[in-house]
Image (cartoon, rainbow, N blue to C red):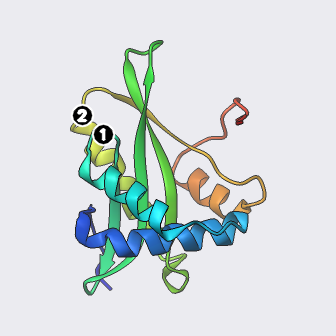
Amino acid sequence: MQTSIRVANMQDLAALVDFNQKMALETENKKLASDVLSKGVGTLIADANKGFYLVAEQNSQVVGSLMVTTEWSDWRNAVFWWIQSVYIVPQFRRQGIYGLLYAKVKELAQQNSNVCGFRLYVEKENIIAQRTYEAMGMEQSHYLMYEE
């Protein structure tokens, strides 16, 4: 089946909200409020300075997505693109869809001379995702993440 990858638009809002809710429940057992999430996803789609979503489609159905946000690196005088909110509909997993999404991220970055690399975070227990990211050429960083 043919999969196409494109930058998300407002018509994808409902699918992206649904994917984020399912991903949060699946990976962290968290329930996200639809109204807050809808505003957050919509704000990102409307403001390219905040980042962008990519969606994967098959037969006009959105079957996967990821979000890219930026982090300025003063050490490199460039930005890292952070890959976040990765979700593939369960029946479409293990079919290379994430690889297509990641290839599109890299293609878009090549068109932007200010991108110095890609980063993402993954749950420590999510071994399947870790193996997928490693298969794409990513390596575990020496940094630990803290939050408050």
Q: Nearer the viewer, residue 109 or 85?
A: 85
Q: Nearer the viewer, residue 12 or 59?
A: 12
- When the figure is inspected, residue 142 is found, relative to residue 89, above or below; the finding is above
Query: Where residue 126 sits: x, y (%)?
Result: 72, 61
Residue 41 lies left or right of residue 126; in this view the side is left
Q: Amino acid at mark 1?
A: Ala
Q: Is residue 14 left or right of residue 144?
A: left
Above or below, 103 against 115 in this view is below
Label 1 CA crowd tier, 10 Å (few <14, some 14–19, many 20+): some
Q: Is the C-beta separation of discs 1 and 2 under 8 Å?
A: yes
Which residue is painted at 73% across and 61% down in the image? 127
Q: Foreground residue, 48 or 63?
A: 48
Task: Give the residue type at disc 2.
Answer: Asn
**Image quadrant where residue 55 sits:** bottom left
Q: Secondary structure at mark 2?
A: loop
Rendered location of residue 84, percent (x, y): 50, 52
Residue 112's disc number: 2
Quadrant containing the C terminus is top right
Q: Residues within 10 Å of mark 2 (few under 14, many from 20)?
A: few
What residue does disc 1 label? Answer: 109
